[in-house]
Image (cartoon, rainbow, N blue to C red):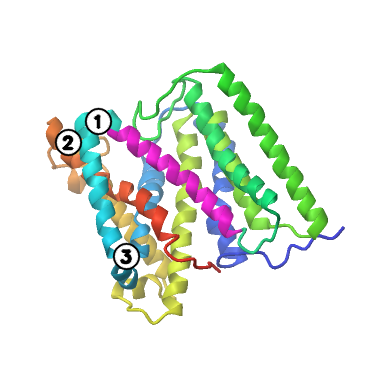
Amino acid sequence: MQVNTQQQPWIKSRLVDSIFILSPPFLALLVVTLFPAEFKNSGKMPVEYWIILIVMIDVAHVYGTLYRTYFNPAEFEKQHPLFIAIPLFCYLGGVLLYMFDGIVFWRGLAYLAVFHFIRQQYGFMRIYSRKQKQSRLFNIIDITAIYTATIYPLLYWHFTGSHKNFNWFVSGDFVLSESATVLAVTKYVYAAIIGCYLIKECLVVYKNRKFNIPKNLVITGTFLSWYFGIIYYNGDMAFTTLNVVSHGIPYMALVWIYEQKRYTGTNEKKTTLLRLTFSKYGGVLFFAAVLILFAYTEEGLWDGLVWKEHQQFFKPFSALPAISKSIVLALVVPLLALPQSTHYVLDGFIWRVKKETVG
């Protein structure tokens, strides 16, 4: 039986998609697997590694949203009420939560982030399924599989108690408990859904002689990165590597691909920033540099005003006074977290403002 693997639903191209969107979870898992002693159970992370993962990828990817919103004159003109209202809502909500209790603020932000991470994987799965014609039942199996890949590891995390060497943001941000029953039931459901998905894909290949490579890589990569990052390994380095690399790099790539296509395909107003970002020579590097500069500034303010943990790296901000008064923290912390909270909420709108087709 010959299976047709041509005419795949790439977003940009086979090469670009493979490197920047599909391969990150597999490469991250490879790195973690090659150095088990450093990743298996460690709760520590070298500062150099933290800079690469958190500053240059995790925080940087948050600012990619700017190119879909505030840096895009045409889009901002169309959606400016939304783009103004959401940051105000996030900030005021954050202040109220922090004034009630600091951990309540971090808990709300953590669960908002989790929802965003889950939805991104669903979004990529839907993008790569856009040209695939299959029954409603098979579509439901795809959707169930991608959500299961993320939700089961989270349930495992929540119901194994506090035996983890990592947190999402800060210690205590997740509400944890212990339940052997929940773990047993969800484990069997998890295995059953994987089995259903594999059978479904075999039927699709047998019936249609087609195999959707990028969609299956997204689903497989999601299963692997979330399972090994949360369940198999119990280390901050492993969790952060698999979580951040699998999420941040594909998001930045999608933003650049989408906006570059828009830039070259319309006559909308093009600012100097957009011209530099989407130029043929060095545009991607400029794009990355802008995001990293924003990320460095944000993390520098966090370190100078709140954490005081990496002053050697954030020397320009080391002279800032550490804030200790609770009322001031209630105003400053939600402000520093505003790029993240806005990114999480706004991202749920900007990718469905229009029923546009990618690729």
Q: Residue at x 29, y 29 (%)?
A: 103
- Mark 2 nearby-residue class (10 Å; few <14, some 14–19, many ≥20): some
Disc 3 vs disc 1: which is toward the camera? 3
Q: Residue at x 35, y 75 (%)?
A: 275
Report how far apart the C-alphas of labels 3 and 2 lie in the structure.
31 Å
Q: Which of marks 1 and 2 is nearer the N terminus?
A: 1
Q: Which amino acid does label 3 sit on?
A: Gln
The answer to which of 350 and 71 lies nearer the viewer is 350
Q: What residue type is labelled 2?
A: Leu
Secondary structure mostly seen in magenta is helix
Q: Is residue 343 left or right of residue 179?
A: left
Res 102 label: 1
Q: Where is residue 2 in the image (x, y as percent from the top left)?
A: 84, 60
Query: Where 322 falls versus 286 (above or below)?
Result: above
- Image marks 1 and 2: residues in contact by CB distance under 8 Å: yes
Query: Where 21 falls versus 196 (above or below)?
Result: below
The residue that disc 2 covers is 329
Q: What stretch is highlighted in magenta?
A: 105-128
The residue that disc 3 covers is 79
Q: Which of marks 3 and 1 is nearer the N terminus?
A: 3
Quadrant (top left/top right/bottom left/bottom right) for the C terminus: bottom right
- Mark 3 nearby-residue class (10 Å; few <14, some 14–19, many ≥20): some
Q: Does the magenta stretch include residue 109?
A: yes
